[in-house]
Image (cartoon, rainbow, N blue to C red):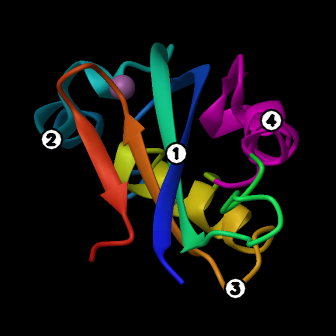
Amino acid sequence: MSKVSVFRREHFNAAHRLFNPGWSDEKNFEIFGKCANPHYHGHNYELEIKVTGETDPETGYVMDLKKLSDLVKENVLNEFDHKNLNLDTKYFTNINPTAENIVIVIYEILRKKIDVSFDLGIRLYETDRNFVEYPVK
Ligand code: NI
């Protein structure tokens, strides 16, 4: 059987602030710059979900992309879209909502929902030019 990767692209808007509570305000601004602004700022996040597996002989699909889309909407977008990641979600109370940490959180959420026979990869674009990928191959 041939393995194929299928991709679904999704989108959410969210606010965040990068801040280490163990540091002084000066150090936070030195390290995180404008991202440490106390009143938060927003991003238009683009999310790419990559599922790799064997094609099903009966459907020809690796995975029904409508089902993948529904899964992402239900478990990720409903949690993150139009939210303040620091304040409105349970995931970033103890970790900074950097793109790196957000992509790991999204992977962990979706990994539980997708059968282990599939490989999962997540790419998160914070801007057109800044993006992260997890896991690392
Ligand atoms: Ni930011």
The crowding category of the residue bearing disc 3, from other C-alpha atoms within 10 Å (few below 14, some 14 to 19, many at least 20), is few
Tell me the quadrant of the picture where the C terminus can be found. Answer: bottom left
Query: What's the residue type where badge 3 is placed?
Result: Val
Query: What's the residue type where badge 4 is placed?
Result: Lys
State the extent of the magenta-drawn residues as a range. 65-91
Q: SS class of the residue under badge 1? A: strand
Q: Specify which label sits upstream in the sequence, 1 or 2.
A: 1
Q: Which residue is mark 1?
A: 7
Instruction: State how many labels appear.
Output: 4
Tell me the quadrant of the picture where the N terminus can be found. Answer: bottom right
Rendered position, 103 above or below 35: below
Query: What's the residue type where badge 2 is placed?
Result: Ile
Which circle, 2 or 4, is nearer the viewer?
A: 4
Whether residue 90 is visible: yes
Ligand 1, seen in the image, is in the quarter at top left
Q: Which residue is mark 2?
A: 31
Q: Specify which label sits upstream in the sequence, 4 or 3.
A: 4
Q: Which residue is mark 4?
A: 73
Rendered position, 98 above or below 47: below
Q: In 3D space, how far apart are the residues under numbered discs 2 and 4 (Cα atoms)? A: 33 Å
